Image (tube, rainbow, N blue to C red):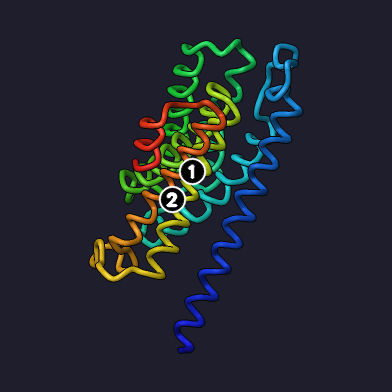
Amino acid sequence: GRLIDTEATRLKQRLLFGTLMVAGFAGLMILDGYLDGSLTSATTTKPIQATILCLLIILLTIGAQMEMAHLIAKTGAVVSRPIVITASILLATGWYWRQFFGKPLEFHLYYMLFVCAFSLFALLLYQGIRIGPGGAIGNCAAGFFAIFYLGFLIGFVLGIRIDFGLWQLLMFVFTVKSSDIGAYTIGSLFGRRKFSPKISPGKSWEGLAGAVVFASIVAVLFSHFCGIMNLSSAIIFGAG
């Protein structure tokens, strides 16, 4: 009985925290859209969009790289946190800086190549000066992986916001978060059949079904009320 009460308490806390987090994010994004003109006809006079989102991404990147550096350290590899964090921020915010140059695709591609090349050079330089030749390949590979994995992927959030719009970004975020909530809720209440016990013992087929259903419902609601995509595409997007 006590175990059931504990699980129920955890479920309520996670649902409450998840709801408040998403609501807070949505509020900030709507404020961001209002300030930069995305929600009004003033967009043409305020071409620089997603400034608040850019600041949030910088903070998120710093926190994620601190955690990544901790995980990398457990493998025995050594990375320079200042280099990794700086390079990741530059990659993650590439879409934002692109706006200052008229949004040319060529600028973004050259920018990404420039950041990747010089971040690798900085890692090699740090390795040579501070550590020496021992473990050079492993250390530099781990650092570059952290930079590209987090910096490059997080950058797509800004890309969705700037190139597609505010409501498309909120649809993406709400769909992903609802998938997580659906998986945890249905998995906690009805999970019996383990999805992959060796890799993730807590995952279940029932939780997977809950994730698909919750995400699909949210995607369909956004597509219907915001006119983002047709019904079948929304279901596929949510289920994916």
Say if 226 sits above or below 143 in the image.
above
Nearer to the camera, 134 or 16? 16
Say if 68 sits above or below 184 in the image.
above
> Disc number at residue 69?
none
Q: Quadrant of residue 165?
A: top right
Q: Quadrant of residue 94?
A: top right
Mark 2 to mark 1: distance in Å?
6 Å
Q: Is residue 173 visible?
A: yes
Tell me whether circle 2 and circle 1 mark residues in contact (CB < 8 Å).
yes
Nearer to the camera, 240 or 234? 234
Quadrant into which the C terminus falls:
top left
Classify residue 13 as left or right of residue 118: right
Q: Residue at x 49, y 49 (%)?
A: 177
Nearer to the camera, 217 or 14? 217
Three-letter code, disc 2: Phe
Q: Which residue is mark 2?
A: 214
- Local packing at callout 2 (Cα closer than 10 Å; few below 14, some 14-19, many 20+) is many
Position in image of residue 49 (x %, y %): 66, 24
Q: Which residue is mark 1?
A: 218
Nearer to the camera, 117 or 132? 117
Q: Residue at x 47, y 59 (%)?
A: 70
